[in-house]
């Protein structure tokens, strides 16, 4: 089952929680990603495109394929790369 998602990657859980609060208060996810994410996907507003289970690191996969509702802000999700805020935009 493929999915598509976007994310924001930062170094600390505190940064991640701060950005989550900003987005939940109305900040635009893509704009926050462009200015705050350390992943190169920031140039696309955090968009990672489509991928299948097993293509991302385990913790990221677990969050994306958990069955949580679409377009819900997930995180912080800790991986070897840092802390992620994730928004699953589709599953099919």
Image (cartoon, rainbow, N blue to C red):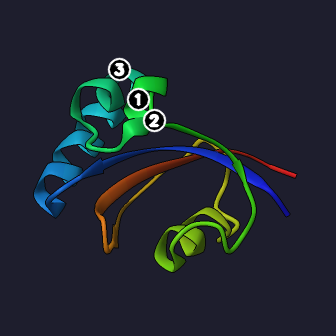
Alpha carbon separation for disc pair 2 and 3: 9 Å
Residue 51 position in % (x across, y down): 71, 55
| Residue at screen point 68% across, 68% down | 65
User: Mark 1, mark 2: which one is toward the viewer?
Assistant: 2
Q: Are discs 1 and 2 less than 8 Å apart at CB?
A: yes
Q: Are discs 2 and 3 less than 8 Å apart at CB?
A: no
**Image: 26 above or below 65:** above
Q: Quadrant of residue 37?
A: top left
Mark 3 burial class by Cα count in 10 Å: few <14, some 14-19, many 20+: some
- Residue lying at the far bottom of the rendered structure: 58
Residue 36 position in % (x across, y down): 22, 34
Q: Secondary structure at mark 3?
A: helix
Report the label total.
Answer: 3
Alpha carbon separation for disc pair 3 and 1: 6 Å
| Residue at screen point 53% across, 79% down | 58
Q: Secondary structure at mark 2?
A: loop
- Give the label on residue 38, or none: none
Q: Which residue is mark 2?
A: 46
Q: Quadrant of residue 81?
A: bottom left
User: Mark 2, mark 3: which one is toward the viewer?
Assistant: 2
Q: Earlier in the sequence, mark 1 or mark 2?
A: 1
Q: Which residue is mark 3?
A: 31
Q: Which residue is mark 1?
A: 29
**Image: 70 above or below 2:** above
**Image: 76 above or below 50:** below
**Image: 2 above or below 53:** above
Residue 6 position in % (x across, y down): 53, 41
């Amino acid at each position: 089952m493929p999915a598509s998602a976007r994310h924001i990657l930062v170094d600390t859980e505190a940064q991640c929680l701060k950005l989550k609060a900003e987005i939940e208060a109305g900040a635009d996810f893509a704009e926050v990603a462009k200015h705050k994410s350390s992943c190169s996907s920031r140039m696309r507003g955090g968009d990672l495109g489509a991928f299948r289970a097993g293509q991302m690191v385990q913790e990221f996969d677990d969050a994306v394929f958990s069955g949580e509702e679409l377009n819900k802000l997930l995180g912080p999700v800790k991986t070897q790369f840092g802390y992620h805020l994730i928004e699953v935009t589709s599953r099919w």
